[in-house]
Image (cartoon, grey):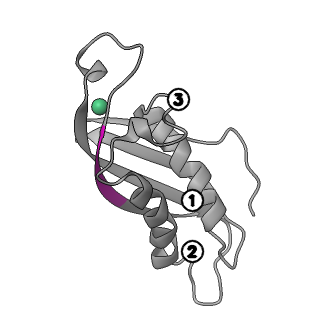
Amino acid sequence: MFEVSVEQTFAAGHALRNYKGGCEDVHGHNFRVRVTVEGEQLDATGLLVDFLELKSSIDGAIAYLDHKFINDLPPFDKINPSAENLAKYFYDRVSEGVKPGVPVRISEVCVWETDTSSAAYRPKYSALV
Ligand SMILES: [Zn+2]
């Protein structure tokens, strides 16, 4: 199995609802997002997925959040903008955007709020598409 990862960063504010502690108040992070794609075969160029194509599919999802107050933006006006829910958001958005020439699947999306705190989303099962 081959695996390709790209990382991007963005800055945004959020506040956790139904949380007792500092994260209940409005605050910001320099978030880091890592998207990992896996697959068993490479294209004729020897690539699983083009880094640039993968990065550009993340860029759109990041542009939606960058320098914004995440709680104001759907779906985070309804669901909490936790690192866990942000990881699922990136999984859903990037899944729509990646159209490589060989079968791949997103195996993991990891979101860091700080250098030492992260949350990941991995689909329980997804077919190579
Ligand atoms: Zn936070």
**Mark 1: few, some, or many residues within 10 Å (few <14, many ≥20)?**
many
The answer to which quarter of the image holds residue 122 is top right
Residue at horizontal 39 percent and vertical 51 percent from the top: 65
Q: Amino acid at mark 2?
A: Val
**Numbered badge on residue 94:** 1
Instruction: Give the residue displayed 33% in from the left and 28% down from the top.
Output: 15
Gap in Å between the C-alphas at discs 2 and 1? Answer: 13 Å
Judging depth in this view, the residue of 35 and 73 nearest the camera is 73
Q: Which residues are magenta?
A: 8-13
Outermost residue toward the front in this view: 72
Observer-nearest of 65 and 103 = 65
Q: Which image quadrant: the N terminus?
A: bottom right
**Is 27 contained in the magenta span?**
no
Is 12 covered by the magenta stretch? yes
Q: Give the percent coordinates (x, y) of residue 115.
A: 22, 41
Quadrant position of the C terminus in the picture: bottom right
Q: Secondary structure at mark 1?
A: helix
Relative placement, left or right, of 73 versus 101 is left
Which badge, 2 or 3, is on the more N-terminal residue? 2
